[in-house]
Image: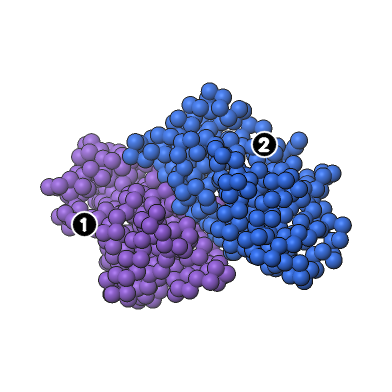
Chain colours: A blue, B purple
Amino acid sequence: MSLITSFKELTEHLATLNHQPRVAVVCPYDEGTCGAVADALSDGFIRAILVGDKSMIEATGLPARFPSLVEIEEASTPAEAAAAGVRLAREKKADILMKGLVGTDVLLHAVLNKEQGILDRGNLLTHITVSHVPGMNRLLFYSDVAVIPYPTLEQRVKMIHLDLGVLRRFGIERPKVALIHFTEKVNPKFPNSVDYVELIKLAENGEFGDAVLGGPMDVKTACDLHSAQVKGIESEVCGAADLLIFPNIESGNTFYKTLSYFAKARMAGMLLGPDVPVVLPSRSDSADSKYNSLALAALACH
Amino acid sequence: MSLITSFKELTEHLATLNHQPRVAVVCPYDEGTCGAVADALSDGFIRAILVGDKSMIEATGLPARFPSLVEIEEASTPAEAAAAGVRLAREKKADILMKGLVGTDVLLHAVLNKEQGILDRGNLLTHITVSHVPGMNRLLFYSDVAVIPYPTLEQRVKMIHLDLGVLRRFGIERPKVALIHFTEKVNPKFPNSVDYVELIKLAENGEFGDAVLGGPMDVKTACDLHSAQVKGIESEVCGAADLLIFPNIESGNTFYKTLSYFAKARMAGMLLGPDVPVVLPSRSDSADSKYNSLALAALACH
């Protein structure tokens, strides 16, 4: 497939596919969720199973507007709707799970349920974000801004595997992965910088297939070739990073929020690790970001 | 004094002052340092003592170009130049110390020397950055992107005191301070979020004078009122933060580098805590940022 370098190219690519993944939307009662689902239905790249109170779902107008693309799965309480959405995913009747007007903790509780959930034992639950900064010639992927505060080496290995699976869906054949730190120096005082050396060794031994890892390096070195050259850092990743792995949730989250507010970037995000991608927008996400997240999940599950 | 809301207003304000602080520039041999010093001399807001090898200093052309504003202090090695620059500051013959073509570790070694240095026992060495993002109606101040990896509660108290001293020089009479975290929830798993509660109590008891502290909150909530309103967070700081205190160096550094590269912000920075402000540009800093840092230090020492 050809390389996808923007959200516009992503949705154009999805429109060319014959198969529309089924999104189980838990409690689709709020305007933000319904607007994003309506746009994705209208653009033809998903079908939807709306899970929750039937009269509230009908009040959104979605079933009447898209009769051939929308089904309703009744559930009375948010907890029951969450469990029903997860069950649909487990029974392979839904390809994507999306959070509507239900608490994140309620939905995650159902996802992580040991008997009835959709996260296999030993699998990692992590979050991937994709951003497009105006003027940039490619998408930037990064983890983890939301789920794992301080990943261990083992968790980072699993995280990179999950993330690279997504990058390859975007046609990035030889992903460049930047291991982010505040300096390029390795120092035992900062255990993540030592883990980075291990990760690079694993990559050189083929752990991640055709992918290049570089670091420690800061976000500017990862994305701006000029900064790397001034610092004399030589790595194929410098100025060309596709995927940024952050040292901790505070730095990842700061990157995400700063790109979004100050650099006016367009955003998408989803949870990785469960049987199906989980779209879990936060309250302050824009309608555009919710729509992009649906597109991201739709590509990831194809 | 009136409020300074941009770097242009900062240098305009400095030009109106009668007194020009003396900057001891250690090893001013590189183009970046000399260019910034020349511009600041030319704009009339500093005098300079160039510390190092006499013939190398004369080769820069600065002494010939600004004969009435520039002195030379001879020193043969970079370590001797660093010690000489620090001595000038200690003897109150220099008001600002600036790093040229000398290792950061060499200069800091001289600054921190127990007998001959300029950091009093019990004082904190910290770093403050100031950014102006295009289109923003104010400057953003933040700490610590460079020196203290994981500040303790006591260090944070000292850091906020030092930072607020700078903000007040910019005419910010009632600074709003955002205590940054990845979520607004306080959780003992994240000790900095617990420290933030203590800091807010201290502020309410008058520790920081006329200043408002708020948090935990993320950078978007701190700077974007709309995000705060969507999340239902009520604090005078939301969307109006003047000073951002970061949980750790990884998140602070990520904010700094992301604003600089992706949001095209103008930057300035300096070390606080020693007897005089120390301007310590990094290799990848732009000429503009070195010049702004001199202006920042010039205001701070007035």
Q: Residue A41: image x %, image y %?
A: 80, 57
Name the amino acid, label 1: Asn
The residue at 40%/54% (across/down) is: B189
State which chain disc 1 sits on. Answer: B
The mark lying in front, picked from 2 and 1, is: 2
Question: Relative to B209, does residue A111 appear above or below in the rendering?
Answer: above
Q: Which residue is the site of mark 1?
A: B123
Looking at the rendered structure, the secondary structure element under dot 1 is: loop
The residue at 42%/53% (across/down) is: B252
State which chain disc 2 sits on. Answer: A
Q: Residue B129: image x %, image y %?
A: 39, 57
Residue A55 in sight in this render = yes
Q: Which residue is the site of mark 2?
A: A168
Q: Residue A192: which numbered mark, if any?
A: none
Q: Quadrant of residue B162?
A: bottom left
Task: Using residue B218 as the reference point, say whether residue A268 is left or right of it.
Answer: right
In which quadrant is the N terminus of chain B drawn? bottom left
Query: In this view of the protein, which residue sits in the foreground, A155 or B257?
Result: A155
Query: In this view of the protein, which residue sits in the foreground, A47 or B21?
Result: A47
Give the number of marks. 2
Instruction: Kindly give the residue lying farthest to the front in the view shown.
Output: A115
Task: Using residue B166 as the reference point, say whether residue A98 is left or right of it.
Answer: right
Name the amino acid, label 2: Arg
Q: Quadrant of residue B30?
A: top left
Q: Residue B204: image x %, image y %?
A: 32, 74
Q: Residues within 10 Å of mark 1 (few under 14, many from 20)?
A: some
